[in-house]
Amino acid sequence: MALNDWADRAEDAVERPHRPLPSGRIRPAAALAAAGALTAAGLALAARAGRPSLAVAAPLAATVWAYDLTLKRTPVGPVAMAAARGLDVLLGAAATAGTARRRDRLFGQATTGRAVPGQDVPLVSTTDPRTLRRALPSALTLATHTLAVTTVSRGETQGGSPLAPLAALATTGALAWGLSNGRAGASRPIGDDPTALHPGRVGAPMDTGQAGVGTGGRLGPARGAAPGPFAHPVTDTLRTALTLAYAATSAHPLFHAVLNPSPPLTQRAVGGGIRAMIPLQATLAARAGAPVTALLTAALAPAARKFARKVSVT
């Protein structure tokens, strides 16, 4: 955000003079320094999580800087933004799979058979390539949504054709259909919702989907496990509700922008698309069999709506 405001400072001085840089509340040099420092900190944290995380974080940082400084106003700008969002998801997958630790207070001994109860146990030292492959559908889902929203955003200051919001509306419908009917977007994160795959069994070891427990250190479903979303009535209901929330949050303002692609309605459509990422990611978590994570993510939506009334999310 700091880099974006620094790169847009000349344009904002004309079109958005109230923004922090053109209004004089923040010096351009300070914004650029903050962008560099935060990027360096992010790369350092990724390196701390392991080389696989850094291998994803480096192109992610490069994509963000390239988008803000060069690509934003070119035809490939929306593609670059979508790539950044997809890489962001893959970074999370690489980080959580790179070195996972869990508390062994429930089972009396570590899954490795060598640690003391209650001691942190390293479960995985390197990233299984299948972990990133399983995260690809979720990354592509968020990238597709981002591509549609970013394309619409190009008309938020001057308005434009209804074709962009119409295409985004169709994209929202297609993604919503896929979320409710397709396969799960990603494998369940390690250590998340320990009873999700075994309803009613508190603290039961997870032999499907957790590395080191009945899988020989592999991540993902055990041999013979059927692919697809976690099948449980509660999770299915939650997934359906979150999918509807995503569709409503994104589609409603887009529909108005299709009817009247004026700058105010286009800006509202872009804001709705950005806020829709919360129920979208919550839906992906529910599909992966992590209802608690899904609910915690969805709980951010009211705060996002309140925040959007005070600060433009675009």
Image (tube, rainbow, N blue to C red):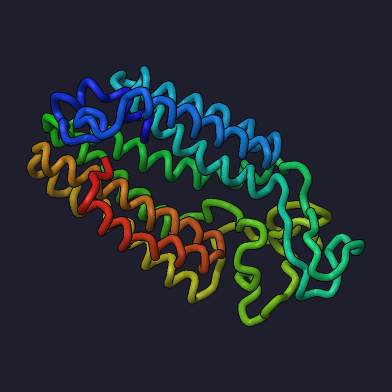
Q: Is residue 117 visible?
A: yes
* Residue 197 percent across, percent down from the top left: 63, 69
User: Percent position (x, y) of residue 312?
Assistant: 23, 44
Residue nearer the viewer, 273 or 7: 7
Q: Give x and y (percent) for residue 109.
A: 86, 70
Identity of the residue drawn at 47% across and 63% down:
294
Q: Which residue is drawn at the image coordinates 52% and 45% (left, top)?
A: 137
**142 left or right, relative to 228:** left
User: Which residue ends up furthest to the bottom in the rendered image?
Assistant: 200
203 sits left or right of 162 in the view: right
Picture layout, residue 215 above or below residue 162: below
Image quadrant in which the C terminus is located: top left
Q: Residue at x 26, y 57 (%)?
A: 305
Q: In this rendering, is residue 117 above or below 172? A: below
Which quadrant would residue 194 be assigned to in this image?
bottom right
Quadrant of the image for the N terminus? top left
Looking at the image, which is closer to me, 32 or 211?
32
Residue 160 at least partly seen: no
User: Which quadrant of the figure has residue 57?
Assistant: top right
Q: Position of residue 267 (x, y in %)?
A: 18, 41
Q: Nearer the viewer, residue 36 or 49?
A: 36
- Residue drawn at 44 percent across, 60 percent down: 297
Q: How many marks?
A: 0
44, above or below 302, in the image: above
Which residue, as the protein is rendered here, is positioned at the far right? 114
